[in-house]
Amino acid sequence: MMKDSKIKPWGYWTKENCIQESLKYKTRNEFQKGSVSAYNSSCRNGWLDEICSHMVELKKPNGYWTKENCIQESLKYKTRNEFQKGYRGAYNSSRINGWLDEICGHMVEVRKPKCHWNIKENCKKESLKYKTRSEFQKGYNTAYKSSRINGWLDEICNHMDVVGNLKMRGIYVFEFEDNYAYVGLTGNFKRRYNEHINNIDGVVYKHIEETNLTPKFIQLSDYMDEELASKEETVWENKHISEGWNMLNKKKTGGLGGCNVKWGYDSCKKESLKYKTRKEFHKGSSGAYKSSRINGWLDEICSHMIEILKPKNYWTLKNCKKESLKYKTRSEFQKSSSSAYKSSRINGWLDEICGHMEGTYGHWTIKENCLQESLKYKTRTEFKKGSNTAYESSRRNGWLDEFFPKTKRG
């Protein structure tokens, strides 16, 4: 299959573009080979299962990876790395059950000679495979560690992208055509962009869903000291307010949020090992689960878990409708029953079966729904604070004077 050789601009592989690209392929393998950038973006952002739901699933039945079957599969590979890449399910089952050393006994151990990473040129060559220090450390920690100990790190990483950290932050803004904006600060612009675009609980994502608008992402500063960045964030928010922008920021700017120190990759992986299913993981440690989903690690971190799957073709219109009735919002539906949600979306049933839900797209475009919501409040200010989406829809459609006449409500 021909690969698309044309380089796309940064930020091109949004969820929608990845979905459109994936529809060209019948299997994940074809997708990965034919459009590696779209595939990798889907992996990183945790969209892969949803985006590939139309594809032919080449999965083995539950319980297939017995010791005997893992041995047979392992014989196809010369190294553990090839085995892991070639059939992760068999590799993970072997590792979890403690068979890995035994069934990989025939494989070649690809190890570097002693003192290999004490040579500066070897570390430099390895570092060129990575774009950031974080990637270098995760990709080959031994080379990274040797470079740091020997004082070569700054020199051999000078080709890498500069990103911030907890002590160095940069300012950014999302601007929408309807005059709404969100100002924030971050230690990694690319990561933070992806988090906002894909976090279904975030204000930027919700505004995209409500308005169907694509925001402009603007980097407002370079990375700077955290204290200065905190002050600059407030300056930029006030500047936008003075220019007439409506701010989506719920919390007052000037704080130093944005980086989840506790739930990094390693801590999420360690936490996930306490649970047998994704459902248990989500219930038992929602912070780790959410961080894994947002950062696109969920499939990898949950690879040891038991998959509780419905039989093929289970999610008919009738079953999807029955499942949807358990939830009050599309967000709850998507989080709690992603398979039913995906089937509904792919088959075009979503609007129909989510009609009973609050806050679904189009819900607040109906005057009667806005009127019923407004009756909970005595003033326009209370209405705006209590249900901003309903308020804005009422304002845009000219219903506010009718809902809140000049005489005060009782």
Image (cartoon, helix red, strand yellow):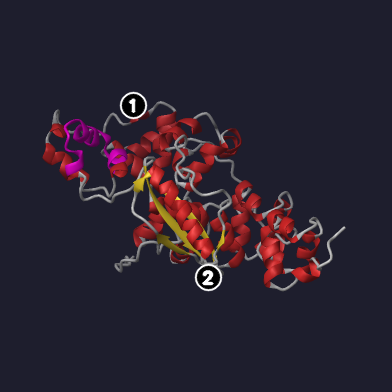
Q: x%, y% of residue 161? A: 28, 51
Relative to 179, say whether 160 is above or below.
above
Relative to 365, say whether 71 is above or below.
above
Of 155 and 40, nearer the camera is 155
First of labels 2, 1 by sequence position: 1
Q: Residues within 10 Å of mark 1 (few under 14, many from 20)?
A: few
Q: x%, y% of residue 133? A: 28, 43
Is the C terminus in the top left, top right, bottom left or bottom right quadrant? bottom right
* Residue 177: numbered disc: 2
Whether residue 76 is visible, yes or no, is no
Q: x%, y% of residue 65? A: 46, 36
Q: Name which quarter of the figure residue 348 lies in.
A: bottom right
Is the N terminus in the top left, top right, bottom left or bottom right quadrant? bottom left
Q: Name which quarter of the figure residue 153 lies in.
A: top left
Range drawn in magenta: 136-155
Would residue 15 be found to the left or right of residue 121 on screen? right
Whether residue 120 is visible, yes or no, is yes
